[in-house]
Amino acid sequence: MTAPSWLDRAQGNLRRLSGRTPIRVKIITALLALVIIALAIISTVSLAVFRNYLYGQADTQLVALYEQTISSMRQQSAFGQPETRIIGQYGPPELVEVLNARGQVLTPTGPAGPGLEGPNVPTSKAWLAAHSGQRTTVPALSGTGNWRVITRVFNNAVISNGFGSTSAPQTVILVVGTDLGSVNTTLAWLARIDLLVSLIIVVALAIVGVAIVRASLRPLTDIEETAGAIAAGDLSRRVPDQDPRTEVGRLGRALNAMLAQIESSFRARTKSEAAARRSEERMRQFVADASHELRTPLTAMRGYAEYYRQRGGIRNDEVDTEGPAGLALEPAQPGAVQADRPHNGTGQLSGADLDRIMQRVEQESARMGVLVEDMLLLARLDQQRPLERRPVDLLTLAVDAVQDARIIAPDRAIELNVGSATAFLVLGDEVRLRQVIGNLMSNALSHTPDGTPVTVAILAGPREPVPSVVLEVTDQGPGMPPEQADHVFERFYRGDQARTRKAGGTGLGLAIVAALVVAHGGTVALKTAPGEGATFRVTLPLAPEAQREEPDDEKAVLAREDDPPEPPDRRSAPSGGKRRG
């Protein structure tokens, strides 16, 4: 593997430097570099153009002087008194002189004026032949000045001294020139002015550029601060809104949309985790409650079976000394008389004892079967298995439930109030809806004292969001405190925390009601207070055919959450009359 060259290393260092450099520094540096390059180009071009213009003017004057000098020479046919002349008071100094072949000035007056160095014209034949009659720039004899000159060689020239005598023929060099000192001074001043102005422009642009870049990148700083706050846990932070027509505005809007999705995802995950924890807690509680509820009938059945075996239903040579539930048993004395009561000893069971044992076994088996069926129903509802969807007349189900309750509790005043509506049809499973009403009625009969009135009402429900029907089961019992009312629809929840059998039930009846109502697209609510009874309100959407029919009197039948339950002695039905089963 070959070692990287210096060019590769330099490129790598530049890339690393670029990666470490903040974007605002890059922008400002690039901006200033472009401005400096632009100013340099502008200054260079302007100086070149102005220099060509001044040189053009100097060349025009030089050509005119050269032509004038040549014309004068042609008129005289020979040179007059050789001399150096400074021509023009306002323009650049102009010079006409004659040199011999050795470069000596053929004038007695010396240099071209006070304080002015003449041009340093080369006298080589090659240079003179190459530049004869052409405009050429040559340096001054000393200093940094330069001249613009036209040279021409004259062979066998005769020079007159102005008094009639002439020199011998010789080779001379005619030099016509103009001094470029003023041109150079003007160009130098212009260059200094350009440099000064360029520096001012660059400094001013750097200051303004830094301010503009900082202001332009401020939204990115806000985005950085927002990201830092979100990373610290504040998911509610958002990027300040900018004009959506700008890139930063569109970026901010996209980031806010992304942050909203991230926040909703985090909230959903948090809710999901909380729901999972609650579900796990409910599952543990459910398993514990189910184990407790199933253990009770199983223990009873096992106890009666052991009692049956110990009393001689099954012959054993050895008999346990403990009865059901740890009750100590004593052997029966020989010749003891069997009675129709439980015996604390061995021996044959009487018919009454056997009947009682089998009756209790059957009761506990039925209780366990109901509990298992309820648990299975809740499990199926949790799996969201589809229910049967057929039009069901809720009024018919309510009438049947009231009739059944009157037979079970003939000493209670059980009434059915029907609101004014054309039909109370809902789409659902008739068997499950009967179970909803039956559980509500059973709850009212089981958890209120004997003789407590119970009222069932069928009313037209709210029209929004969809037309609905309301079923209310109201009792005038002792009611419940809020801490119990908040948990009545939970599984295995009972107000009797000691789980006695005084009120019966397993705590699944109202949980099944809530699950079945939700499966039918409805809602269930409880309104209760200590000493004010309880009202269970079930709201179900009407079937499509019932929704197309308008009620006779909408004002009289709307069910509301704040409607008080009817007093026990009320005998008139609200608006729609009263129906008795």
Image (spheres, grey):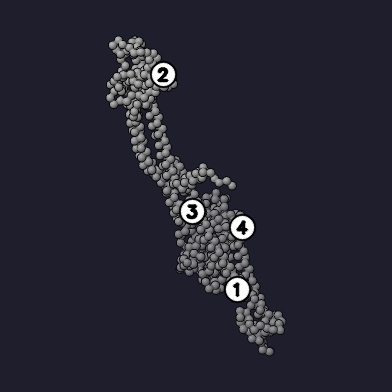
Q: Under tag 1, what secondary structure?
A: helix
Q: Earlier in the sequence, mark 4 or mark 2?
A: 2
Q: Under tag 4, what secondary structure?
A: loop
Q: Earlier in the sequence, mark 3 or mark 1?
A: 3
Residue that mark 1 sits on: 296
Residue 229 can be seen in this image:
yes
Residue that mark 2 sits on: 132
Residue that mark 3 sits on: 263
State the residue lying farthest toward the bottom: 334
Q: Nearer the viewer, mark 4 or mark 2?
A: 2
CA separation, marks 4 and 1?
30 Å
Give the residue type at disc 3. Glu
In the shown orientation, is residue 556 left or right of residue 88? Answer: right
Q: Residue at x 51, y 43 (%)?
A: 6
CA separation, marks 4 and 3?
33 Å
Q: Residue at x 59, y 60 (%)?
A: 382
Residue 353 percent coordinates (x, y): 66, 80
Q: Are marks 4 and 3 in contact (CB under 8 Å)?
A: no
60 and 97: which one is in front?
Answer: 97
369 and 321: which one is in front?
Answer: 321
Q: Quadrant of residue 134?
A: top left
Q: Nearer the viewer, mark 4 or mark 3?
A: 3
Q: Quadrant of residue 328?
A: bottom right
275 is higher (above) or lower (below) than 97: below
Give the residue type at disc 4. Arg
58 is higher (above) or lower (below) than 580: above
Residue that mark 4 sits on: 385
